[in-house]
Amino acid sequence: MNITEHNANGVVYLTADGFRAAGGVAHGFSTRLGGVSEGIYASLNLGLNRGDDPAAVEENFRRFCAAVGTNVHSLAFSRQVHGDTVRTITAADAGKGLDSPVDYEADALITDVPGVALTVFTADCLPILLYDPVRRVAGAVHAGWRGTALGVVTRAVDRMVDCYGCERLDILAAIGPGISKCCFETHEDVPNAMTEAMGAAALPYIQVLPSGKFRLDLKGLNVRRLESAGLTQEHIAVSDDCTACLPEKYWSHRVTRGERGSQAAMIALV
Ligand SMILES: [Zn+2]
């Protein structure tokens, strides 16, 4: 399954071919391009709590939602805490984030309610969208290295099965733009967390550098997580875009040292 880039009135975003082919879902991964924010937030900043003008962020959401095909008043955000909590989103959560406060913490959102647009925010961490076109269930996951070690994407798949009766072989997954192995250099705490959590299965995704530091392939680790969760390889798409390599196209938390806007990944059943 491949990832395709689109440009809708200047809003540049990515989608997974398999999701589009299956139909019944609106989804997209945002880039920096196509919004109205200025300075370090230029231009399509979708992060509300990063110091940008709230009116500009709302306009950016209108543009991104129009491009993707979602309703700007039916978004469901969450307070992301690098954990592995999965929240089942109901109609009562629609609007939490942009229209009303978010009253829960979670790094994975799943739902079977049409129209609600599950939204996660990233700027190096991985956005992962999940879609079961048979049972009609959607998921959105925020996975940094802590979430990857905790297996947040595995927990999301498990909850889709337990809560909504999804079959693992029906589930499609798309890993969006995030920091790639080329740029994710770490100390030993990160590879240690991976091998503690995943054992030898993590080793192919860890490179030891001559400096004694490490490079980790977070995208590969999450593909491995998804395969272990029962998804087939053909149902997993991975964006090649590295947020740290492409500063004109994406915000990277590392590159900007935190002075940045945010990308969003969004999915809604239609
Ligand atoms: Zn890179």
Image: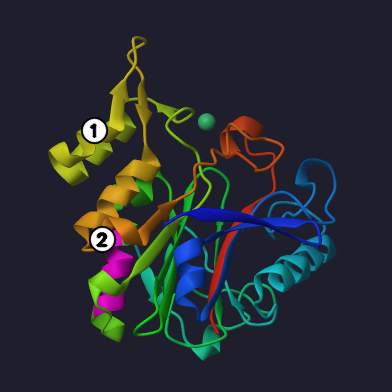
Question: Residue 151's spot in the image, x, y percent?
Answer: 28, 55
Q: Mark 2 points at which residue?
A: 232
Q: Is residue 160 magenta?
A: yes
Q: Is mark 1 on a helix, strand or loop?
A: helix
Label located before the other in sequence (1 or 2): 1
Occupied quadrant, residue 181: top left
**Vertical position of residue 91 compared to residue 157: above or below:** below
- The quarter of the rendered structure image containing the C terminus is bottom right
Q: Which amino acid does label 1 sit on?
A: Pro
Q: Which amino acid does label 2 sit on?
A: Thr
Residue placed most toward the observer, 94 or 100: 94
Q: Is the magenta stretch mostly helix, strand or loop?
A: helix
- Work out which residue is located at the far left of the displayed protein and give it: 200
- Identity of the residue drawn at 43% across and 47% down: 144
Marks 1 and 2 close (CB-CB < 8 Å): no
Residue 82 in view of the camera:
no
In the image, is the residue at mark 2 within 8 Å of ligand 1 by its beta carbon? no
Q: How far apart are marks 1 and 2 (CA)?
A: 19 Å
Q: Residue 204 carries which label?
A: 1
Magenta-highlighted residues: 154-161
**Vertical position of residue 108 compared to residue 88: above or below:** above
Occupied quadrant, residue 96: bottom right
**Vertical position of residue 269 compared to residue 8: above or below:** below
- Work out which residue is located at the far front of the displayed protein and give it: 21
Query: Is 242 placed left or right of 63 in the picture?
Result: left
How many C-alpha atoms fall within 10 Å of the one at disc 2: few (<14), some, or many (≥20)?
some
Q: What element carries label 2?
A: loop
Q: Does the magenta stretch include residue 103?
A: no
